[in-house]
């Protein structure tokens, strides 16, 4: 057979990923970590459809968004899209039923999003996002809660203070800056676009664009340099995060404005410090979005952030401190607790009854469906990382329990099987797995 | 404001569902139950992309499948589809990398599938499936393992023997029947289609169709009635499930043939016994699919089943015995462990430090971001189902811990907070929640 040919005939669609068991386990580790930290913070989980009306994204971001949308006409000629992000769905859901929930609403979500852009390192066309949002509270206490959550998520992954930083700013400081300089409000969005690109663009080009709206690169640069944690725009946020012991994770960076999107106040991004990767997460305050999405019916302040699985996964693979948590999780999740070895086929019926009894007692058990040599069955037990082998042979109604880690073994009566297995599994693991 | 108007401007696309927190929690309960029973059986989790090449589905099921496909052209004119099921992706993945995994491969998956059909009770356009498959073992031990898994999943949901049944058959018995009657093989697929519809179609029509291929309704009916667990096609399966104590959950039903699909041997469906719902799950043996999908390169026997969340959800809501598990799960998942009440705003900094310390110790904590009356904060604690309230007031560095269930309270030193909270939370709950 020819794997190359096979791959050519059926492979994933460009930018989409298979999750074979090893990758799926890592994905589940990421999900479980997101979920458990969000719950510690009192967030509750929601989910939105993967497909929404294309209008929902047009309304939020204007027509230009459709360049990166997976958008289609369905058979009834509806314009629909695979969601590129979850915030518009959140705004739709929360504004429709906001009266049913106490404020502030603290909601999180985990699921696939889709962008039609060229796949490259850190970018796939299907990716998974963790979204955390707080609606109905306009205070910087909300912003602090979200920044703290982002920090604690990173720490929960074993990514430490030496490995990442929160780059934080507030759009309001630029609004104030423009007002101070007497620049007309209409230039605001073009200006933010220049700031957003200032680190990557050529200085001459940036200078030229700034001149066009009546500013010099020097005055912008000097304002950026002078903006630090002492700026009053950060006062409440700083006091809060300082009390939590988390301010040392933050670096004020006025170049963070989060593109052209809908942010109104605090904005932040999570960056790794050692590998120059894209942002791991980003978000901020978007107080006008609910009003926009509900045609002014529900004016609800809001803030939130999203973290994707792709850049995070690269960072996890590059961070030694993150590996232990992954290994521990995979060991706990993969494999089985016990493998039933049928040494004598005449005992298969009894062995099956035992398999059923053990599984009903919530023990993870596997066994061979067909007749196999005992050695092969022990090999399978090892492949499955089983801690125990339970051997059904001529001694029945007695069976042998072998502890494949401690190498101890004992012959017990079948009626003691479940309780003995439970006791063995409750013991701490010592020694190396053998089989 | 006008919710009706709002709904009209932005709602979910037809056939798609929002999962507000209550619904998302129920969804997570279903996921966790699927996952934990599958793991007990030694299955490991995988995931496939939500989008695949449309050819993948054409190859498996022929052109007629596209009537119910969400299929599109992407911007590069690729024919792509939202997956209607996961088995073709599984076959693609498993045949491509089958050498990397020991046989039998026991894999499960949980994720969204999409069908473009008219939404009605038990059918949505986006639904979630649990798929469990075993590849690389042709024995009826595999079939028994899958039937047992399906039964144990139902039992884990609190759906008991009085509530559901496995309707089981084997396609081979019909192949043998046709051979006995001297019917040409080419009529096989038309014949199975007639059998598949025999319960719903008018007897005259069925009789007419059967006559056209040389059979009478009477001989088909009498064969169906005479086919029971004694038929040799079920011998190994029956012995296995009897040893496990699970045969009483099975009813032989020769009318089960699973439509026109790709099944080759054992086929089964899970039906509720009280409410006349659609099948909760269905599956069987499909030994030829891997060879078909890999152009004959990988000929691997296989069997599996799928269970959707929609019919299952209806059945759960109609089954009193299923409610306790749901309630217990929701109570454990929703809400927080402790609510920090800031009685004196001057203590907010200390309160925030305590929130951070408790969350770092994996305690689920919430608090108010802004200044609020103490009564309102206790109200919030109740809304969040908090077991403990921790009051920061003038007594600091002492704080009051109120147990909102037992109504007891004590004043403790701040340095004892985390350990005291952990001890309180470890106690069993007695009494009713008050706040």
Image (cartoon, coloured by chain):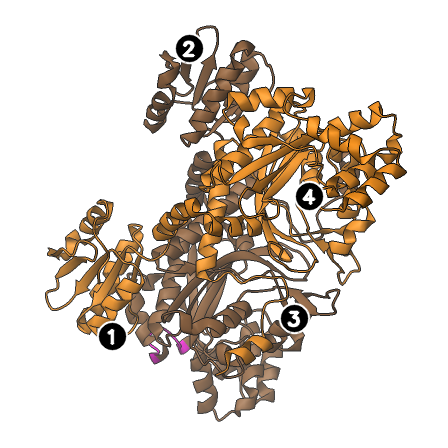
Chain colours: A brown, B orange
**B108 vs A216: above or below:** above
In which quarter of the view is residue A388 placed? top left
Secondary structure of residue under mark 4? helix
Q: Position of residue B243 (x, y in %)?
A: 52, 20
User: Residues under labels 1 and 3: Cα distance?
Assistant: 41 Å
In the image, B277 versus A261, the foreground residue is B277
Picture disc at residue A54 = 3
User: Which circle, 2 or 3, is nearer the viewer?
Assistant: 2
Residue B271 shows in the view: yes
Q: Which residue is mark 2?
A: A397
Magenta highlight on residue A11 = no
Secondary structure of residue under mark 3? helix
Q: Which residue is mark 1?
A: B372
Q: Position of residue A404 (x, y in %)?
A: 43, 19
Secondary structure of residue under mark 1? loop
User: Residues under labels 2 and 3: Cα distance?
Assistant: 66 Å
């Amino acid at each position: 057979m020819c794997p190359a040919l096979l791959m050519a005939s059926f492979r994933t669609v460009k930018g989409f990923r298979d999750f074979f068991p090893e990758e799926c386990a890592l994905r589940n580790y990421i999900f479980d970590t997101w979920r458990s930290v969000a719950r510690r913070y009192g967030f509750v989980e929601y989910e939105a459809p993967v497909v929404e009306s294309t209008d929902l994204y047009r309304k939020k971001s204007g027509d230009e968004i459709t360049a990166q949308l997976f958008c289609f006409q369905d058979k009834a000629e509806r314009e629909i899209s695979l969601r590129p992000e979850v915030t518009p769905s959140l705004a739709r859901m929360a504004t429709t039923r906001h009266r049913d929930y106490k404020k502030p609403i603290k909601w999180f979500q985990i699921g696939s999003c889709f962008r039609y852009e060229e796949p490259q390192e850190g970018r796939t066309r299907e990716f998974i996002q963790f979204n955390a949002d707080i609606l109905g509270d306009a205070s910087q206490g909300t912003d602090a809660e979200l920044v703290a959550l982002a920090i604690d998520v990173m720490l929960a992954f074993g990514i430490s203070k030496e490995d990442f930083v929160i780059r934080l700013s507030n759009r309001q400081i630029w609004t104030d800056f423009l007002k101070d300089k007497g620049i007309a409000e209409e230039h605001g969005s073009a200006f933010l676009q220049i700031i957003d690109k200032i680190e990557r663009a050529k200085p001459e080009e940036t200078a030229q664009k700034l001149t066009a709206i009546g500013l010099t690169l020097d005055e912008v640069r000097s304002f950026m340099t002078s903006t630090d944690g002492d700026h009053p725009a950060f006062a409440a946020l700083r006091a809060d995060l300082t009390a939590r012991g988390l301010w040392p994770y933050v670096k004020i960076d006025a170049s963070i404005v989060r593109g052209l999107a809908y942010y109104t106040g605090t904005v932040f991004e999570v960056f790794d410090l050692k590998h120059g990767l894209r942002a791991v997460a980003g978000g901020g305050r978007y107080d006008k979005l609910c009003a926009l999405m509900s045609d002014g019916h529900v004016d609800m302040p809001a803030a939130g952030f999203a973290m994707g699985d792709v850049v995070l996964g690269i960072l996890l693979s590059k961070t030694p401190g993150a590996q232990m948590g992954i290994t521990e999780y995979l060991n706990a999740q993969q494999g089985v607790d016990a493998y039933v070895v049928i040494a004598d086929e005449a005992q298969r019926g009894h062995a099956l009854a035992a398999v059923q009894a053990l599984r009903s007692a919530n023990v993870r058990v596997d066994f061979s469906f067909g007749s196999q040599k005992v050695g092969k069955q022990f090999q399978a037990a090892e492949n499955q990382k089983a801690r125990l082998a339970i051997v059904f042979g001529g001694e029945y109604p007695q069976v042998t329990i072998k502890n494949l880690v401690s190498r101890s073994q004992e012959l017990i009566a079948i009626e003691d099987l479940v309780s003995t297995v439970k006791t063995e599994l409750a013991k701490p693991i010592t020694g190396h797995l053998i089989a």
